[in-house]
Amino acid sequence: MTDIRPGSKAVTLKDLAAELGLHASTVSRILHAETDTARGAAAPATAQRIRDLARKVGYSPNPQAKGLRTRRSHLLGVIVPRLSDLVLAVIYEGIEEAADDAHYSTFVMNSRDDPAMQRRKAEIMLTRRVDGLIIGDAHLDGDILNELTERQVPFVLMNRAVPGFPSATCDDTLGGTLVAQHLWDKGHRSVSVIAGEPYASTAVDRTNGFVSRFRSLGGQIPERAIVWSRFDTLGGRSAADTIFSDKNRRPSAIFAVNDFAAIGAMGAANSHGLLVGRDLAIVGFNDTSLAAQLPIALSSVRSPMMDIGRLAVKLLLGVLNGETVKAVKLAPILCVRESSSQNWMSE
Amino acid sequence: MTDIRPGSKAVTLKDLAAELGLHASTVSRILHAETDTARGAAAPATAQRIRDLARKVGYSPNPQAKGLRTRRSHLLGVIVPRLSDLVLAVIYEGIEEAADDAHYSTFVMNSRDDPAMQRRKAEIMLTRRVDGLIIGDAHLDGDILNELTERQVPFVLMNRAVPGFPSATCDDTLGGTLVAQHLWDKGHRSVSVIAGEPYASTAVDRTNGFVSRFRSLGGQIPERAIVWSRFDTLGGRSAADTIFSDKNRRPSAIFAVNDFAAIGAMGAANSHGLLVGRDLAIVGFNDTSLAAQLPIALSSVRSPMMDIGRLAVKLLLGVLNGETVKAVKLAPILCVRESSSQNWMSE
DNA sequence: GCCCTGTACCCAATCGTTTGGGTAGCGAAG
DNA sequence: CTTCGCTACCCAAACGATTGGGTACAGGGC
């Protein structure tokens, strides 16, 4: 069993060497070179002795010393708007998993989508000497990203994309398209969109995908039917209130670009005496674990969140290896449930 | 502006010293000793020159070198069952904030509440030489905690408590008590509990608090009215199904020890044709941001999640300073909403 | 006996800080 | 003119690992 006590002494290379009557460098080479044949660093018998002892005393190299020497921390920084956003939390699980597999560790920090804080958190991470950043809170204006590029910081975007930068995202445009097709097929001709934050590519792409497919099918979506809002339940509720307050236009369906906004909208519908699934169809996005479990099950576009996380790590490791990586989009799937499964009779 | 490029050269103490015609140690002392009068390490004018240059070039000490020398990483490890549990995500925000204030950085890892993984993740963190651990997935049997204690790893528990170890939690017993009193006052005499995972103190304490108050008010709660389950929506749904399937006993109220379980129970109630708030009262726990926004607003016990996170950091820093710290419980508040606000007419 | 080629190691510098212990120069006290 | 005590610094040894460059010895060929 390992025996590392923070602050106090852990076993070092030198300890091992002394115990074996060898030099630390020899031990290092053997323990280090596993794969590439240990280029004659020691006799096979010696190598075995070294490995046995190392295992026995639970030796694990001091990462600070190693990092100091190799200029690699094996640390990745992850910046998200907020981890209390379930979508990001799940993506992070994928990140953690993939990073772990690659023997990297990850820092996460919340930026609250605030540019000043984004800068500050990125700075802290660089101060910690992370090897690279995974950025989950990119704004479409991309100021910070340009700075980072200029400073040659290796990074990739995750969840949200910005043109010109490597990223791991869901194909949000396609997701929006799927929803438009679905609602159209169900007979809806008057629809509204709760569009999310205009600085996030997720919001913009999902909305665009939806709107352009709906229009290309012959439908009409006036500008005022698109309401920008926050991504959480409160944002969804107030956006829905805005939609319902328009007396001249009563949409039969609402597409919310995020499940939480959709849940908020469901609440608002309820307050306005509308029964979701019968009087009003609602479709969300991300298919978070709640969607299917709600009292009225919510239709939603399933985005492969875990995979996005894993992919982000893979891309970043690519960047760290000097490869040039591009934006990758993973395909979403539409999950139709009670909230939008009924056919709508157009009057 | 700082200028740290991972992998490539950042400005070092020696660089500063060379630029100023001083020795690195002098620069170190000045930059380091800010508070304690820089014990005559340099003339005031020199000190000023040093600080100015350091600021100008954005010097920031290499944490690996520093850690190597001082045997302190200024890193805290945080282990949670899953960050996709909103409760833990919010607590983590508190942790991040407090750690940041104290100039510590935090690692988070998900253990999925699986003992083998808890061990593995703790091991990884120690391998990374964290200064201490904040453990959010403690099981009541406490095996791992004893090991850690024996190995003299500094740690505190968070969210869940285990007798004999320092912890930052909500006063869960009190929370359960509040719910019992509330439901009793509303006239409910037949109640059931969705009790959560039996290895988690949160579940056990909330349930105990509830049951003992309800009984002391004169109510009866048979053992079969207490259903243990997972903490998520699915767990809540199936627990509720179990409760509803008992034909001999139709509770008028359900206390779910977690909001997500409560949401699942709402779904189940719906499926069984029960209107929550009218036919059945439901109360959750934690008052997550969703509770108030649901189509039928959920009554819930508000636990000070952010504060729990902040407190956990404070306690751990205490431990690191050699203080002996104890378990601290923060008071919860009951928030009554639509799901349980009606008076129940007992037949 | 001499040179050559491996094999199996060891040496020492280095990464960037921190920190206990100097020391040079100077003014003042004796 | 010492001696003392400052002030304002410098020196060098760690911390634990990596890595380019030795070196000693053995065995083989001529």
Image (cartoon, coloured by chain):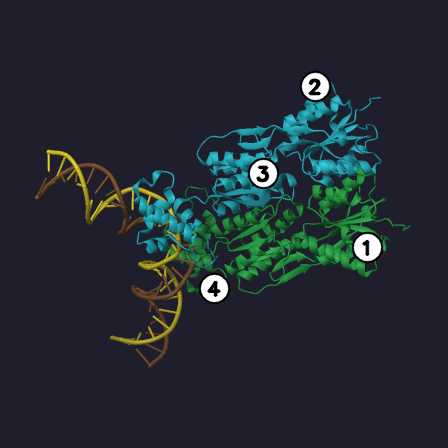
Chain colours: A cyan, B green, C brown, D yellow
Give the mark nearer the N terminus: 3 vs 2: 3
Q: Is residue B215 above or below residue A321?
A: below
Considering the numbered disc 3 on the image, is that residue within a helix, a strand or a loop?
loop
Residue name at image x 78 percent, y 50 percent: B192
Q: Label 2: chain?
A: A
Q: Nearer the viewer, mark 1 or mark 2?
A: 1
Residue name at image x 78 percent, y 59 percent: B213
Considering the numbered disc 2 on the image, is that residue within a helix, a strand or a loop?
helix
Q: Label 1: chain?
A: B
Real-space Cα separation, disc 3 to disc 1, in angstroms: 42 Å
Tell me the kind of residue under disc 2: Ser
Considering the numbered disc 4 on the image, is that residue within a helix, a strand or a loop?
helix
Q: Is residue A54 above or below residue B35?
A: above
Residue name at image x 62 percent, y 44 percent: A83
Real-space Cα separation, disc 3 to disc 2, in angstroms: 32 Å
Q: Percent from the top left, x then y, of residue A113? A: 62, 41
Q: Is any part of residue B290 visible from this angle? A: no
Q: Which residue is mark 1?
A: B182
* Same chain check for tags 1 and 4: yes
